[in-house]
Amino acid sequence: MRVESIHIYPVKATGPVDLASAQVELAGLRDDRRWAVVDPQGARLNATTHDRLLTVTATPDASGALTLTAPGQASLVVAVPHDGREVAVDVTRLATMLDAGNDGAGWFSQVLGEPVRLVWQDDPARRPISEAHGGLGAEPLSLADTGPLLLTTTSSLAQLEAWIAEEQEPQEIVMRRFRSNVVVDGSDIPFAEDDWRGIQIGDVPYRFAEHCDRCVVTTIDPITLAHGKEPIRTLARHRKWSGKTWFGIRIVPLATGKLSVGDELTVA
């Protein structure tokens, strides 16, 4: 099995940045999910209620500064606000973040058509992985929902498409809907990843944290923004337990290093 693709989402809920390689940090891939868009009260916005976030691409440079692009919008470069104003936020297990300034706020406000702020997570150590989601102590976490990296496999996606085709016209469900960090190809068994508890990708070892439960964001076409019922409807028929629907696993790096497309994955 090998890594087919690598993706980061520097601003939470925005579109992916596709990479040939990425630096692995204990909190996740470098630059992944370290920024967020919040409303004036500090509540984080998500793609379920603000699907235009999916049209935004935030590309980091070597310093972590972002180049923001979106259809019909002039691009903008936003520096990492190391000395930004600390603001209160309503983000799970995080009370404050650093404000990224008026330019970034104005840019996202134009995209979304309402006043918002762009904020940055200065220290992932202040948001450890919850024990309820597979955390083992003071393990740092980015703004990812519950675990540092999300891994999916092409064989599981192929099985999902086959299930859909059994009951309706065949549909191509792009992996982009599942917002993976690491997509793995070469597994002969769909959903084999459910049972992976320890894996090695390249030189970096990882441990399993939890299975990933899926929300309605997966039913939004990330290109057209059309809303539908798939793939959640079909997943729920085949992959529902504990009242939730599942696809992919969350994994935790046990060391720092590099992740590259083509890296071999082995199961411990």
Image (cartoon, grey):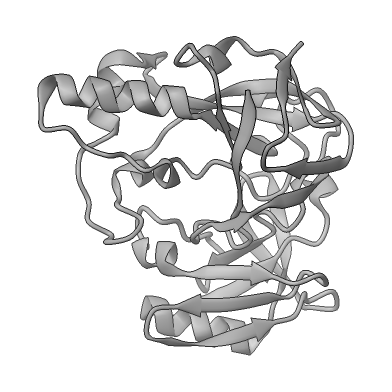
Please provide percent x and percent y for residue 208. 69, 20
Residue 25: quadrant of the picture: top right
Q: Residue at x 37, y 46 (%)?
A: 217
On screen, residue 211 versus residue 86, left or right, reads left
Q: Quadrant of the C terminus?
A: top right
Q: Residue furthest left?
A: 168
Residue 2: quadrant of the picture: top right
On screen, residue 189 versus residue 232, left or right, reads right
Task: Tell me if I can see residue 154 in this picture.
Answer: yes
Please provide percent x and percent y for residue 190. 44, 15
Task: Tell me if I can see residue 246 in this picture.
Answer: no
Please provide percent x and percent y for residue 157. 39, 28
Q: How many marks?
A: 0
Q: Residue at x 53, y 30 (%)?
A: 152
Is 164 or 143 nearer to us in this picture?
A: 164
Please provide percent x and percent y for residue 121. 74, 60
Q: Quadrant of the N terminus?
A: top right
Q: Residue at x 74, y 75 (%)?
A: 65
Is 30 or 212 nearer to us in this picture?
A: 30
On screen, residue 101 versus residue 5, left or right, reads right
Vertical position of residue 242 compared to residue 127: above or below: above
